[in-house]
Amino acid sequence: MNFSLTPGLEQFVRDQANSGDYNNASEVVRDALRLLKRVEDQRVLKLERLRAAIRDGDTAAANGEFTDLETNEALDAFFDSL
């Protein structure tokens, strides 16, 4: 697999490889891709949880399980009670 890096990223990879924390540029790129995968996995999980919370909220509202708060004071009192 071949890919191109901007000059700035290429220099960053070189600097990381030369820092002694990595043996070569391939290790730097592999570590960066593992980090990117972890970030993406977390993003997907957060999105799934958000969608589930929205579904739960929609179901609760459809079943009449909600509190109608019509003023800022009522909203403040509701959150104070939590």
Image (cartoon, rainbow, N blue to C red):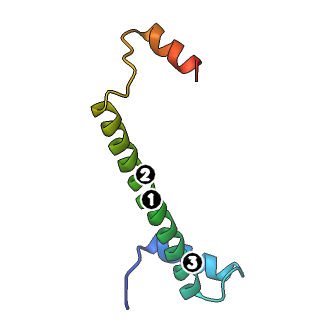
Residue at (51, 17) in percent of width and height: 78
Between disc 1 and disc 3, whose residue precedes?
3
Above-or-below relation of 3 to 57: below
Q: Which residue is identified by label 2?
A: 49
| Residue 41, above or below 79 | below
Q: Which residue is mark 3?
A: 31
| Cα distance between the residues tagged 1 and 3 | 21 Å
The image quadrant where one finds the N terminus is bottom left
**Which residue is found at the position 58% from the left and 85% from the top?**
27
Side (left or right) of 69 relative to 35: left
The crowding category of the residue bearing disc 2, from other C-alpha atoms within 10 Å (few below 14, some 14 to 19, many at least 20), is few
Q: Residue at x 31, y 32 (%)?
A: 63
The kind of residue on which mark 3 rests is Asp
Report the disc number at residue 45.
Answer: 1
User: Which mark lies nearer to you, 1 or 3?
Assistant: 1
Q: Secondary structure at mark 3?
A: helix
Q: Quadrant of the C terminus?
A: top right
Contact flag, marks 2 and 3 (Cβ < 8 Å): no
Verify CB contact (< 8 Å) between mark 2 and mark 1.
Answer: yes
Vertical comparison of 54 with 10: above or below: above
Question: In front: 59, or 32?
Answer: 59
Q: What residue do we see at 66% from left, 83% from top?
A: 22
Which one is nearer the viewer's eye here, 59 or 43?
A: 59
On screen, residue 69 versus residue 10, left or right, reads left
Percent x, y of residue 3: 37, 84
Instruction: Kindly report the distance in space between the C-alpha atoms of the residues bearing marks 2 and 1.
Output: 6 Å
